[in-house]
Amino acid sequence: MRKLLCILALLAGAAHAQDAYVIGVSAAMTGPVAPNYAPVVEAMKAYLEHVDGRGGINGRKVRMVVLDDQAQPSRAATNAKQLLDQEKVPMLLNVSLSSTYAPMIAESKRTGVPLYFAGAVCPKETYPPADPLQFCSTAFGANLDSQAALAFVKAQAKDPVRIAFQAMAIPIARAEIDYAEGLSKTLGMTVVEKQISPPPAPDYTPFATKLVEAKPNWVWSWSPWVAQVRTFESMRRLGWNGKYLTWAHLNAEEELARIKDGDFYVVGTNAFLEDNLPVHAEIRAVAARAKLDYPVSYLTEGFVAGLVVEQALRNTPWPPTPQKVLAAMNNLKVDMKGLRGGPLEWTKDNHFRTKQYYRVWRWDRAGNRIVRAQDWQAIEVKR
């Protein structure tokens, strides 16, 4: 009798697992760059648990299987194989450095399972004409970010622009800063220096010194936050007084208030918590219920990913298969509830979004607060 009960319990457990939507995540949950990625995963998980508490998706719960890759390609490869071959997930997510992309893309192609970059920088293969299996909702995206950043610099600059560039030595960041260097020349800017630091560097002073010696009046930096901000702070310690523009990562709102430098600008596509939108109240409530340790301002990207996963799975007929999930993702429109300048839309040929909206913020010394240096500006995402 006891043996029979054990068998029945196992069968019931298996049935319960099969009755849930299961998604697989490989993420940099620990290691030097974890502060940029772990909050995304935790916020997404908290949001999907919030959805489960409201009745789930099409009456079923969502189960996230999260494996830590520590931003190491070999671990990402192992994680992807486990998620695809053992967990049989119909949707694979990457939330890690671009150095982990290649092995996960290879596994996605091997199995035909869509690969969704959520919190990880959007590869150009998600732009139109998109790779059939790669999708991305992350705020930042290659090339478009530099287009928005340099357009802002050109509009703000009162003197001829002497621009320098900074990036971390990881594939996508390096490619982006090379692209920005070429683009700046077409905009009439003079490029004076470019520094690439290792991931991460123990000391950014040598790189900052080279930048300062070139005497730029603007710097554009596009990398994980640690490289962006430590290069800037090192330049300030060396006496440089120019303007520094960088990407608004998860911690940008909090960091602007810490640094309190009126010439330190961040450009991004997620609304700051200072807007106090109804969705921000929801984020605060979800974070409190889940007892998340991260500042609420770190959680927007994960909340966006949760909204996207929720809508994609709602549009996926039961039982989910990679083919059904892929069909849903190829025709998706998600209301961002004000977290961005407009909805996120994916089509069969565009797995990034049809429009990308940018804002720029800085610290206002006089008002002792964060202010917008530029409100939403849209860039059409075309072939």
Image (cartoon, grey):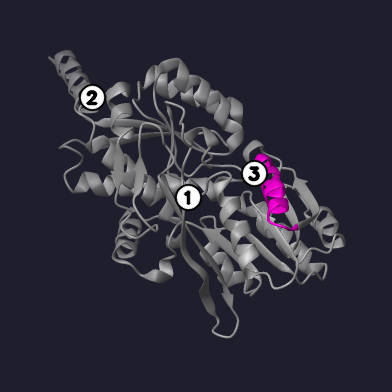
| Neighbourhood count class around disc 3 (C-alpha, 10 Å): few under 14, some 14–19, many 20 upward | many
Instruction: Tell me the amino acid under the disc marked 2.
Output: Gln
Q: CA distance from mark 3 to mark 1?
A: 15 Å
Mark linked to residue 139: 1
Residues in magenta? 174-189
Q: How many angstroms separate mark 2 from mark 3 (CA)?
A: 42 Å
Label 1 sits on a secondary structure element that is: loop
Question: Is there CB contact under 8 Å for labels 2 and 3?
Answer: no
Q: Look at the numbered discs 2 and 1 and tell me whether their residues touch, using CB distance below 8 Å.
A: no
Relative to 224, say whether 77 is above or below.
above
Q: Is there CB contact under 8 Å for labels 3 and 1?
A: no
Q: Name the residue beneath numbered marker 3.
A: 176
- Could you tell whether 344 is left or right of 202 in the image? left
Question: Callout 3: helix, strand or loop?
Answer: helix
Amino acid type assigned to the residue bearing label 1 in the image: Ala
Residue 248 has which mark? none
In the image, which is nearer the foreground, mark 2 or mark 1? 1
Residue sitting at 74 percent across and 71 percent down? 159
Task: From the viewer's perspective, tell me whether residue 65 is left or right of residue 81.
Answer: left
- The answer to if 66 sits in the magenta stretch is no
Of labels 2 and 3, earlier in sequence is: 2
User: Which quarter of the image is occupied by the N terminus?
Assistant: top left
| Badge 1 density bin: few <14, some 14–19, many ≥20, Cα 10 Å | many
Residue placed under numbered mark 2 in the picture: 18
Q: Name the residue nearer the viewer: 2 or 146.
A: 146
**Direction right: furthest residue:** 213
Q: Quadrant of residue 130?
A: top left
Give the label, 3 or 1, closer to the camera.
3
Q: Position of residue 23 (x, y in %)?
A: 35, 32
Give the amino acid type for the residue marked by disc 3 in the picture.
Answer: Glu
